[in-house]
Image (cartoon, rainbow, N blue to C red):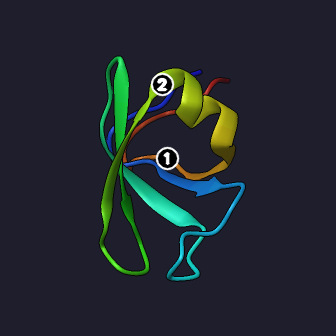
Amino acid sequence: MDIQLGDLVQMKKPHPCGSLNWTVTRVGADIKIKCQGCGRVVMLDRAVFEKRLKKILRRQAGEEGPS
């Protein structure tokens, strides 16, 4: 899966604050995401992140998608 810094993603289950949307702040073997509702930062293994991901809402500005 192609996840990039700055991507806005939607997870399958809501965060306790009620938000489903997160911003990707670190990419590697682990993925760090920041809640758009309350600002909490969470780090997940890539496999766990990909399992919990529902969809990518917005790519980082300036990046081209597959053509």
| 65 displayed left or right of 32 | right
Residues tagged 2 and 1 counted as in contact (Cβ below 8 A) = no
* Location of the N terminus (image quadrant): top right
Q: Nearer the viewer, residue 52 or 7?
A: 52
Splitting the image into 4 quarters, where does residue 19 fall?
bottom right
Which percent across, then down, holds residue 10?
A: 62, 57
Label 2 SS: helix
Mark 2 vs mark 1, CA separation in Å = 18 Å
Foreground mark, 2 or 1, reads: 2
| 30 displayed left or right of 1 | left
- The mark that comes first in sequence, 2 or 1, is 2
- Residue at x 40% of width, y 56% of height: 23
Q: How many marks?
A: 2
Please name the residue that numbered disc 1 is placed on. Answer: 59
Amino acid identity at mark 2: Arg
| 35 displayed left or right of 25 | right
* Marker disc for residue 46: 2
Amino acid identity at mark 1: Arg
Q: Residues within 10 Å of mark 2 (few under 14, many from 20)?
A: some
Which percent across, then down, holds residue 47?
A: 56, 22
- Residue at x 43% of width, y 80% of height: 37
- Residue at x 67% of width, y 24% of height: 67
- Residue at x 58% of width, y 81% of height: 18
Label 1 SS: loop
Q: Among all residues in the image, which is located at the extreme front? A: 16
Q: Nearer the viewer, residue 52 or 55?
A: 52
